[in-house]
Image (cartoon, grey):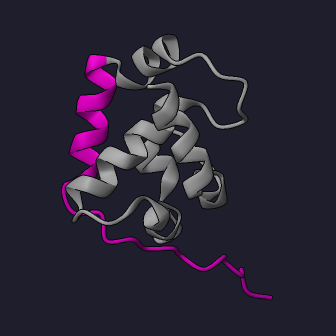
Amino acid sequence: MGLVLPPIEAYHVQHLPMVQAYADKIGLVEAMNAVVPTEMASDPGTLVLGMIRDTLSGRSPLYRLEEFLAHQDTEVLLGKAGAPAACNDDTVGRVLECL
């Protein structure tokens, strides 16, 4: 019997991992979480980082952030795995209102 391996997922990431490294270095997510305390399931720092990523990959409206993240490796680009549905326009709007 042969070994069956799971399919490999591949994503076109371009410069976005460098942005993640810089965000980690300056503590962007932690700073946003400290400034914007919320009781939401998604932390505001990760959502802000997702908006920055979306902007740097080619600006699109906030309601398309979920669509952008659906085609990305969120664990590599945001520092943790997460469902793109958690970054819908309502959630992003609440974070922006708090900011």
In the displayed structure image, the side of residue 7 where residue 60 appears, left or right? left
Q: Residues in magenta?
A: 1-26
In the displayed structure image, the side of residue 57 where residue 45 appears, left or right? right
Does residue 72 appear anywhere in the picture?
no
Could you tell me which residue is drawn at 43 percent across and 21 percent down?
A: 32
Where is residue 30? Give x, y as percent.
Answer: 45, 17
Where is residue 37? Give x, y as percent.
Answer: 59, 16
Within the magenta stretch, is there residue 11? Answer: yes
Q: Residue furthest top?
A: 34
Within the magenta stretch, is there residue 85? Answer: no
Could you tell me which residue is drawn at 46 percent across and 13 percent down?
A: 35
Residue 78 to residue 2: above or below: above
Residue 6 to residue 18: above or below: below
- Counting every numbered tag in the picture gives 0
Where is residue 9? Give x, y as percent.
Answer: 51, 73
Where is residue 66? Give x, y as percent.
Answer: 53, 63
